Image (cartoon, rainbow, N blue to C red):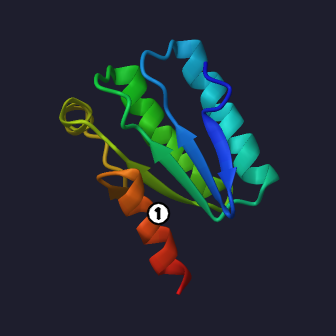
Amino acid sequence: MDKNAVRKIGQMLLVVVPPDLTDSDIIELRREAVKSARKYASTWVLLDFSEVQICDSYFGRFIHSMSQMAQLVGAEAIVCGLSDAVVETLVDMGLWLEGVRVTLDVDSALALTTKAKK
């Protein structure tokens, strides 16, 4: 797993999800993201999936659980960059990202966090 996948940017934690993660990489990334969100008292956890082009059921549950875990440590989750194939898999699995803001790309997500501060 990429050691730079989780980065602190002000009150936001940016999690750039690399493509082709193994199941153990997914668990490690999720733990690192939650640990960092708690450590930095992040207001936002931005989950960037723009590098991910395919999604199986395990990865689909990862997207859902990661956004829920961010909320449980007091951060607001934003998911961005979901490809058409990933969106289709999530819908087929019946996984709705309730309470999670979803944007098309990182720029839109950053704009959303800026707007919310005002």
- The residue under label 1 is 110
Q: Is 46 or 74 nearer to us in this picture?
A: 46
Look at the image and tell me in which quarter the N terminus lies. top right
* Residue 30 left/right relative to 60: right
Q: Position of residue 115 (x, y in %)?
A: 45, 79
- Kind of residue at disc 1: Leu
Residue 92 screen position, x and y as percent: 19, 33
* Residue that appears at 36% across and 28% down: 52
- Count the marks: how many? 1
Q: Position of residue 76 (x, y in %)?
A: 55, 62
Q: Is residue 102 positioned above or below 25 on the image?
A: below
Question: Is residue 99 shown to the viewer in this render?
Answer: no
Looking at the picture, does residue 108 appear above or below residue 29? below
Residue 103 coordinates in the image, percent (x, y): 33, 57
Farthest residue to the front: give it.
Answer: 107
Is residue 80 among what the camera can see? yes
Question: Residue visible at 39% across and 58% down?
Answer: 107
Q: Quadrant of residue 29?
A: top right
Residue occupying the far bottom of the picture:
118
Residue at 56% in and 41% down: 15
Disc 1 is placed on an element classified as: helix
Residue 86 falls left or right of residue 58: left
Is 24 left or right of 10, judged from the image as shown? left
| Structural crowding at the residue carrying mark 1, measured as other residues with C-alpha within 10 Å and reported as few (<14), some (14–19) or many (≥20) | some
As displayed, is residue 113 above or below residue 88?
Answer: below
